Image (cartoon, grey):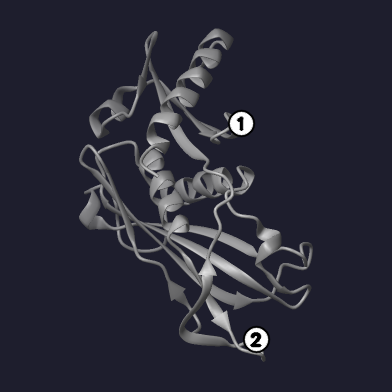
Amino acid sequence: SSYFRSRKQRVKIGNTQVVAGVKMDVGSPFPDTPNQGILIVNAEFTPIASPEFEPGPPGEDAIELARVVDRCLREGKAIDLNELVIREGEKVWCVFVDLHILNHDGNLIDASSLAALLALKNTRIPKLDEEGKVVRGEFSGNLEVKHFPLCVSVCKFNDKLLIDPTYLEEKVIDSKLIIGVREDNLICAIQKQGDGVFEFKEIEKILDLAIEKSNEIRRFL
C-alpha cells in the first residue's frame, strides 16, 4: 500500500476524547469529477469508548458523525480538491480522514470536527517520482488547508439552549442543531438531531452562538 499517515491529533473536550489521523493514497478520480481529488471521512466507535458501542461494522451514529464532519470539511472548502489532481481523469490524491473515539462523554461531533481539521493541518503530501509512483519516506510539502470550518452543537432543553453537552445532558435534551461554521462566518453545514422543534427566533440565536463559539474553538488551531 502507498498509504502515508499524518501524525495523529488527539482532542479532549471534558472527558470526551477523539483521535484523528489522515492517510493519503494515489487513486483514480470519480467518473463525474475527473478534475478533483477525493476526500473521505470514516469514524470508528470502539467498545472501549462507551458501553453503548458494539464491535463490528459502523452503526448509524458512527455513519452520521462521519458524514456531518465530511460535509463540514467539504462544503467549507477546507482543502481544495482541484489541487489534488496528479493527472486529470487518471490519477488523484485520495485523502482519508479516520476518526477514532477513545472516550464518549458527549459532544462527539464537535470534538471530531476539531480533531479532523487539526489532522489535515499536519498532513504532508508524499513525493512522487517521474513515473508517478510514491517515494517512501519523502514528501513534497504540506497539505494546504484553505479554510477552517468547525462544527458547533447547540442543544435545546425546554426553552433553554445549551452548548458542549455531556453524555448525561444529551440523554435528556429535546433536540440538537449542529452548525458547521467557517472562519469567515459562512454557514457550511446544518444537521438536526432529536424529535424536538426549533422556532425561527431560536435558530437565529443558535447561528449567532455557533459563530461565536466556533471562533473561540478555532484559536486552538
Q: CA distance from mark 1 to mark 2?
A: 37 Å
- 186 to the left or right of 154: right
Q: Residue at x 50, y 18 (%)?
A: 208
**215 or 141, which is in the foreground?**
141
**Neighbour tally class for label 1: few under 14, some 14-19, many 20 plus, Cα within 10 Å:** few
Q: Quadrant of residue 33?
A: bottom right
Q: Position of residue 150 (x, y in %)?
A: 48, 39
Residue 202 position (above or below residue 118): above
Q: Amino acid at mark 2?
A: Gly
Q: Which mark is residue 186?
A: 1
What x and y, as percent, mark residue 74?
Answer: 61, 49
Residue nearest the observer in this picture, 128 or 10: 128
Q: Secondary structure at mark 1?
A: loop
* Residue 90, quarter of picture: bottom right
Residue assigned mark 2: 132
Q: Amino acid at mark 1?
A: Leu
Residue 1 on image: x %, y %: 49, 85
